[in-house]
Amino acid sequence: MKVLVVDDSIVFRTQISSSLKGIEGIEVVGTAPNGRIALQKLDQMDVDLITLDMEMPELNGLETLKQLRAKGFKTKVIVFSSQTIKGAEKALEALSAGANDIVSKPSGDELSFENAQEMIRAALIPKVLQFMNKSAAVSASHRSISTPSLEKVISDSKPATSRKKRIGSYFPQAVVIASSTGGPAALEAIFSKVKAPFNKPVFIAQHMPPVFTQILAKRLAELTGAVIQEAKNGELVEKGRVYVAPGDYHMFLKKRDDSVYIFLNQEPQRNSVRPAADHLFESAASVYGHDLLGIVLTGMGEDGAAGAKVLREAGGAVLIQDRESCVVFGMPGAVFNNDDFDEMGNLEMIGETLRKVIL
């Protein structure tokens, strides 16, 4: 994979380039101090992936991305953003404009060059590797599976799939959603089909750093007119609201008497992530049982697979995003591989389903 590093800071260009050195199958083919030079280099060399800073002179990251997509480049783009409100807003806008993933920039005067480089390396390498093999269905485990077409899955009448629910005629009392790489854009796509008011609670575990989840909730609220916020520890669940797990916190649901409450904690990462969708799905299944719909959207790794199994064993239903519409088919691919789903569809179908079940 040929990588172009774009950042106005020579320090960050060096750190990012050094972080990728020695990784088998990855070659840094160039660097650029701003978007204008980056676009010129793209006309002169083959590039598979760009790491793109948001704040740059002459041509910033967002404008660079827009011109990149307008020119028809399909190059994968990982955005580097500061972990601030302003930075998160620009990063989410970049995802809507065609960026594929986000990495938060290390900050703080106390960070040494070596520490910052190690932080970049830990955050960036898994995100680069997920795009290395486009046919990999489960990126984190490096296992490839053969995925039949959506039409074949729906029409297949194997005994193993005879227990699958028809979600179009299923009306649960709550919805849980798991998403990672490509998730923010996917969430915006499906929630664009939903307008407030609606009368079912929805819970989202999106793999993003703190602050970014707050801005994601704000964007979804503006899109739907609904009350969509980061969840708070000890909060009472209300119908018609959407709760987003805060970055770096697991979200659990618990029932007390006849009410459902949200609890947050920073227990160890699960599936190398926090929040983990598996915790959300499993705890929601213990609360709602057969009255629960789980949706697994695009993302690397296997988070949500264990939770989907528990959810279905409790009598609920699981809907997964199809490979063709995913940025990375890892998370839904893991559920597919285990046959722990009821239906599979693209974002148009998932959005329509969400609208029907929560209104």
Image: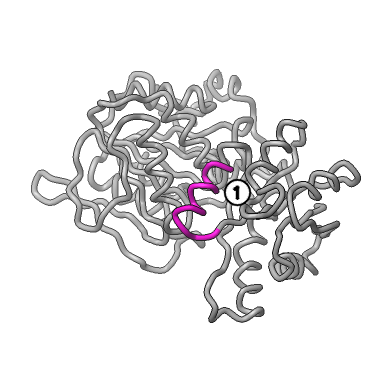
- Label 1: state its secondary structure: strand
Q: Do we see residue 287 in this rendering?
A: yes
Q: Where residue 85 sits: x, y (%)?
A: 44, 54
Left or right position of 14 against 94: right
* Chief secondary structure of the magenta portion: helix
Give residue 144's quadrant in the image: top right
Left or right position of 288 against 349: left
Specify the farthest residue to the right.
Answer: 44
Residue occupying the point 43% across, 60% down: 274
For disc 1, the neighbor class at 10 Å (few under 14, some 14 to 19, many from 20) is many
Residue occupying the point 22% across, 29% down: 199
Seen from the viewer's position, the closer of residues 255 and 12 is 12
The quadrant the C terminus occupies is top left
Give above or below for 123 relative to 77.
Answer: below
Give residue 103's quadrant in the image: bottom right
Q: Where residue 90 sits: x, y (%)?
A: 53, 47
Indicate whether residue 88 is drawn in magenta.
yes
Specify the farthest residue to the front.
Answer: 58
Residue occupying the point 54% across, 78% down: 109
- Point out the stretch of residues depicted in magenta: 82-94
Indicate whether residue 141 is drawn in magenta.
no
Left or right position of 254 against 178: left
Seen from the viewer's position, the closer of residues 288 and 337 is 288
Render colour scheme: one colour
Give above or below for 18 relative to 182.
Answer: below
Where does label 1 land, which residue?
101
